[in-house]
Amino acid sequence: MSKPTENHKNHDRTDYSLSTVDKLRKIVRKKQANRVDGVLIDLYSASLVVQVYDALNDSNKSKLAALPVRKMVNICFEVAAK
């Protein structure tokens, strides 16, 4: 069996050091759905969360970022509907 190349290792690696918001920004940047903490997030949802997050003050940003990703998305949809 051949040894995997360095590129192959990096391709399969999941970057756990990124915050949830950074993972959502990555979805928006790549324009492709992806899993965030085990939840499949589409481009529309990721874009909405990032826009709401950017509009918040620092205190509320930390509160939103501390939530699980499902609850984060649900809250952002509620805020956007108002």
Image (cartoon, rainbow, N blue to C red):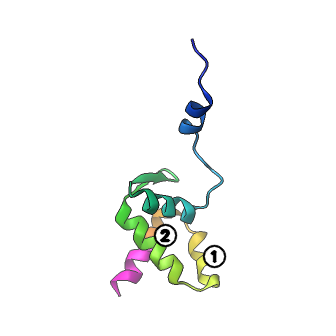
Q: Which residues are magenta?
A: 74-82
Dominant SS type (magenta): helix
Task: Please state which amino acid type lies under the numbered disc 2.
Answer: Met
Give the residue drawn at x 63%, y 76%.
Answer: 62
Residue 6 or 42: which is nearer the viewer? Answer: 6
Secondary structure beneath label 1: helix
Residue 62 disc label: 1
Q: Is residue 78 magenta?
A: yes
Disc 1 crowd, CA 10 A, few/some/many (<14, 14-19, 20+): few
Toward the viewer: 27 or 75?
A: 27
Residue at horizontal 50%, vertical 64%?
25
Sooner in the amino-acid sequence: mark 2 or mark 1: 1
Q: Residue 32 placed where, x, y %? A: 38, 54
Which quadrant of the figure contains the N terminus?
top right
The answer to whether residue 53 is magenta is no
Q: Is 55 located above or below residue 11 in the figure?
A: below
The amino acid on which the numbered mark 1 sits, given as a three-letter code, is Ser
Q: Please, is residue 33 above or below residue 60 in the view?
A: above
Counting from the top left corner in percent of width and height, residue 21 is at 55, 66
- Residue sitting at 38 percent across and 75 percent down? 77
Q: Nearer the viewer, residue 5 or 42?
A: 5
Residue 72, labelled with which disc? Answer: 2
**Marks 2 and 1 close (CB-CB < 8 Å):** no
